[in-house]
Image (spheres, helix red, strand yellow):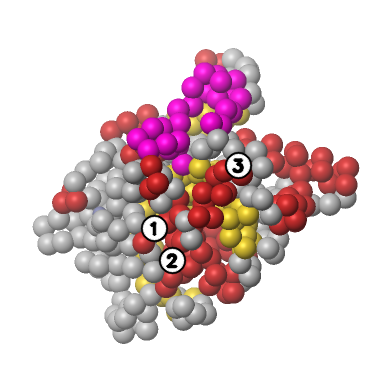
Amino acid sequence: MLARMTEPRALVRITRTRLADGRALTYYDDREPYVSGAATRTLDDPRDLSPSQALPTMRLDVLTGEWVVLAPHRMGRTHLPGTRGCPLCPSRDGAMTEIPARDYDVVVFDNRFPALGSPLHAAAAAVPPLVDGDPLWPQRQAIGRCEVVCFTSEHDSSCAGLTPSRAATVIEAWADRTRALSGADGVRQVFCFENRGAETGVTLHHPHGQIYAYPFVPPRTERLLARAAAHRDSTGADLLSDLLAAELRAGTRIVHRGAAWTAYVPAAARWPVEVHLVPHRAVPDLAALDSAERRELATLYPALLRRVDGFFADQGDPGPVPYVAGWHQAPVGPGRHLTRLHLQLFSVRRAAGKLKYLAGSESGVGVWLNDTTPERIAHRLRELT
Ligand SMILES: [Zn+2]
């Protein structure tokens, strides 16, 4: 399958296959001989893998109304292996990894240790609807999708180091998977994200992100939808469009203003480094971006990550800086019209060698304390052009 793109890369070839245990794997190729179809990714996975019997469950927290996912099988997952044991590098003779090919550009596959089980698991076992039979504790199978996105085959590279053409392929992969997962049974929100750095809980250093497809609307999105609905009721206007217009009007927290995208630090930033990136056009998700928006993003996104990496250089910390980059997309179904695509990029680092911990106030009662101001964060990010 060929997806037509404009500059900086004209075409990406999409090849879908299966791993030995039945998990889906998709190659997104932007180089010859694959992109033209002169060669194809036909390597089978020769490993002797039996399908996972893992069945994550989720329980409703009666005090908050939020679902908590229980996935005890993840306790034994691969943790910070060296380069030679990396499951995200291409396979070599005698060393098969999760990716059967000897090389790849961008690849997406089902996580071997998913926090949300696939529909295949759903048929395997039933879960009692109530924990201990008590109606206070509803319980379900946690059915959704957890996918891994490898941004590059180069183990020691980073998303910030991607060329615009390779970043464009990553965007194409995000858009393709968002489109596919949004159409899957039971999926309510598709979340593409990257945790970078051991400080964010990363268990593999290879440059990669993840895609979660949730069977419910996550709490942050629920609150956003409620706020947006209230704003619409009282003003008749769209909250996120009004927010972008207000940030552009104020100008004090703008980090970058492009033709199709603007990056700004939110007025109530909660992290010591935080920046949001929004398209000027109100689109629900990555799949809805047009070619001009994708082209600009392919340059802008790695550049924004490089600014974050340089944030503490003036304190003697050359980076890389740990971060979480999350693409908030409109939910599938009710409320979809109330919100729009935006990136939230933040770091848990508050100073060179120091981390922001979610302590009593944040973890206990959800009250955030920030040791800096959004205007200072924006000023520092603007300096790092
Ligand atoms: Zn690797």
Left or right: residue 162 compared with residue 63: left
**Residue that appears at 84% across and 52% down:** 237
Left or right: residue 253 compared with residue 362: right
Q: Which of 176 and 47 is in front in this view?
A: 176
Q: Name the residue under label 3.
A: 374
**Residue that appears at 29% across and 37% down:** 77
Q: Name the residue under label 2.
A: 167
> Circle 1 sits in a helix, a strand or a loop, which is it?
helix
User: Given the image, on which type of amino acid does mark 2 rest?
Assistant: Ala
Expressed as whole percent of the image width and height from the top left, the position of residue 246 reads: 75, 52
**What range is drawn magenta here?**
347-371
Look at the numbered discs 1 and 2 and tell me whether their residues touch, using CB distance below 8 Å. Answer: yes
Expressed as whole percent of the image width and height from the top left, the position of residue 89 reads: 25, 57
Q: Is residue 295 visible?
A: yes
User: Given the image, on which type of amino acid does mark 3 rest?
Assistant: Pro
The crowding category of the residue bearing disc 3, from other C-alpha atoms within 10 Å (few below 14, some 14 to 19, many at least 20), is many
Expressed as whole percent of the image width and height from the top left, the position of residue 10 reads: 46, 81
Q: How far apart are marks 1 and 2 (CA)?
A: 8 Å
- Vertical relation: 261 (above or below) 134: below
> Circle 2 sits in a helix, a strand or a loop, which is it?
helix
Q: Distance between the residues labelled 2 and 3?
A: 28 Å
Image quarter for residue 108? bottom left
The number of numbered discs placed on residues in the rendered structure image is 3
User: Given the image, on which type of amino acid does mark 1 rest?
Assistant: Cys
**Earlier sequence position, callout 1 versus callout 2:** 1
Name the mark on residue 120: none
Q: Distance between the residues labelled 3 and 1?
A: 25 Å
> Circle 3 sits in a helix, a strand or a loop, which is it?
helix
Disc number lying in front (2 or 3): 3
Name the mark on residue 159: 1
